[in-house]
Image (cartoon, rainbow, N blue to C red):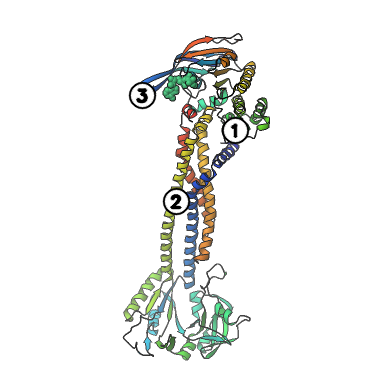
Amino acid sequence: MAEPSSNQPVAELIGVTRNYRMGTNVVRALDNFSFTFGRGEYWAVMGSSGSGKSTLLNVLGCIDRPTEGDYKVDGISTNSLDDDALSELRSRKLGFVFQSYNLIPQLNVLENIMVPLFYQDDPPADGEERARTLAARVGLSERLDHRPTELSGGQQQRVAIARALVNHPALILADEATGNLDSQTALEILALLDELHAEGRTIVLVTHEPDVGERAQHVLRLKDGRIESVKRGQRSMAGARA
Amino acid sequence: MSQSTFARTVRLGVSSLMLHKLRALLTTLGVLFGTSSVIAMLAIGEGASEEAQEQIRQLGSRNVILRSVKPREDFNTGASQNVRVLSYGLTEDDLARISETFPGVARVVPVREIYEEVRRSDRAMNPRVMATLPVYRDVTGRVVSEGRFLADNDEAGVSNVCVLSDEVANYLFPFQSPLGEEIKVGADYYTVVGILLGRVRQQSDSAPAGKSTAEVFIPLETGRKWYGNMQVRMRAGSREMEEVELHEIVVEVDAPENVPVVASACREMLARNHKQSDYEIVVPLELLLRAEETKRIFNIVLGSIASISLLVGGIGIMNVMLATVTERTREIGIRRALGAKRRHIVSQFLVECVVLSVGGGLLGVALGLAIPLIVERYAEMRTIITPSAPILAFLISAGVGVIFGLYPAWRAATMDPVEALRHE
Ligand SMILES: Nc1ncnc2c1ncn2[C@@H]1O[C@H](COP(=O)(O)OP(=O)(O)OP(=O)(O)O)[C@@H](O)[C@H]1O
Ligand SMILES: [Mg+2]
């Protein structure tokens, strides 16, 4: 992977606070949160339920905006972007893998993989080619015209991973990506993520399961919307400093 | 939106709708009936006005027609007798007053009717036998299909010649041309000199049966000479003597704008000179105005029905689309997360609405084209489908889809992606 600016961090959170107003209470899902995810790193985000993991991932994925602070993707500050620009950013720089696969039921496998490209202002000409290659890579070349309901959970999640790769994203975000799968299938999906990491992709994976966290390169622990601990693994390469 | 993007959006819309076929079909019913009534309305209205105009063309738009009408039965006079004399109707004096004193009158044609049976060998019928002048044809714009109409020297010579309408000619002479042959009117023989088309228009189009009239024309003087003013009319069980000088007077006005003036002058003159109401006045121009008025009312009624069904159909589409948007909240969240902009979501749902309403519109056009055929067949009304009608109906249905789809599409597009993704 030839990244244009490999010394620049992929995702940078600067004093991010995300408040939810519940009647008179204010819930601080993220509390003055600053952190930097470096290029090519593979992070597992862990923490108890309600600690703010999903909120963090939503902010990283530009589908949620910080109440305060700033978030930069690939050096681009998101504060000043309007809804359209933010959407374009998602379709170009981000890949999502969800717990419940979230494929679109009326589209077949090939079309599902291509969805992020549909929404780019200036879609690449080789979109279908890319989608076929990715489908082959996740072992689904034989199922291109199947609908999601005709696939197993593991197969659906592999389509979702192919979809998350089709736009050559700077950052892949996975929220409990193995949460709905049996352990054997979960291992296959994790192996796929390992491969992506080996290729130099940046991955942030939210998980509850310690052994899933173990497989990641680094582990970030949250508690009450703050960083509880940061555990860096052996293969750390990029300069990511909080 | 590029062409392929548009095509893909339409295909996506169709496949989303196909997930609930019955629902989609039921949703389109309102628009279906709306568009079909638009088309039927236009076709029937157009046909009615065409028919009225044709009727007027037959009677002559510059003409005022006066007819003798038998006054209502008076049971006190001679009701117990078998034979009585009834004297009524237009007179030679009326004719003279109109032709001599009315300004704006071009020509005046008197018509007498002869109550006699018409026969030829073993075939007999009872057409209108009319004794009239040669100008009758010109004033009424009738068309000769074979031979000639009555001529001045027939009148001068009091000849026994006649002209048949095509209906009579076909009935009496099914296998040969009647020209030069003889027919019997009452007890007298007449030589056929010409055939007149029953209607002004020549093409034998979709006029309902029974419209063309059976008529026989003879010279006015011949009629006077042989039949006089006093005629016997056979009635169920009784014979009736009638004395009528003229049965009809056709007044031709020099210019259309003078028709109302001449018509009211005739009305006044007749009211002054006739003690009983034994006449009627037909003004084709007034018929035309009345036909236009009828058409207008018809259009208002059917137009309201069409707008109400389109409104209800549109609301139905909006309702179903709102439910669909809620049902597909998660899909919207996924698409937004994957980079869909608000306008992509708007166009996705708007296209679905338009596909629904245009689908209904197309079915409606099909039904709308069928209704006039049925009406024509069973109600014996003329209908005319102008090419613009289906196009108009189609555009209206597409418009309904856009208008009633905007709100659901806007609702879908303004959802918060995070909330939408959390939706079960
Ligand atoms: N839409 C919302 N409205 C109000 N409060 C919210 C909303 N979303 C999240 N929160 C609150 O923010 C906090 C963090 O939520 P978040 O979903 O990020 O937790 P999490 O770490 O993903 O938990 P889990 O492991 O259960 O998924 C929680 O206290 C939650 O109640
Ligand atoms: Mg969560």
| Mark 1 CB near ligand 2 (8 Å cut) | no
B39 on left or right of B67: right
Q: In the rendered structure, are the residues bearing label 1 and label 3 in contact, judged by CB atoms less than 8 Å apart?
A: no
Q: Is residue A125 above or below residue B100?
A: above
Q: CA distance from mark 1 to mark 3?
A: 40 Å
Q: To which residue does mark 2 refer?
A: B309
Q: Which three-letter amino acid code belongs to the residue tagged 1? A: Pro
Tell me the element at label 2: helix
Tell me the element at label 1: helix
Q: To which residue does mark 1 refer?
A: A148
The answer to whether residue A55 of the structure is visible from this angle is no
Residue A205 is situated, as x and y percent measured from the top left of the image, at 55, 18
Q: Which label number is shown at residue A23?
A: 3
**Badge 2 local density, few (<14 within 10 Å), some, or many (20+)?**
many
Do marks 1 and 3 share a chain? yes
In this view of the protein, which residue sits in the foreground, B144 or B333? B333
Tell me the element at label 3: loop
**Badge 3 local density, few (<14 within 10 Å), some, or many (20+)?**
few
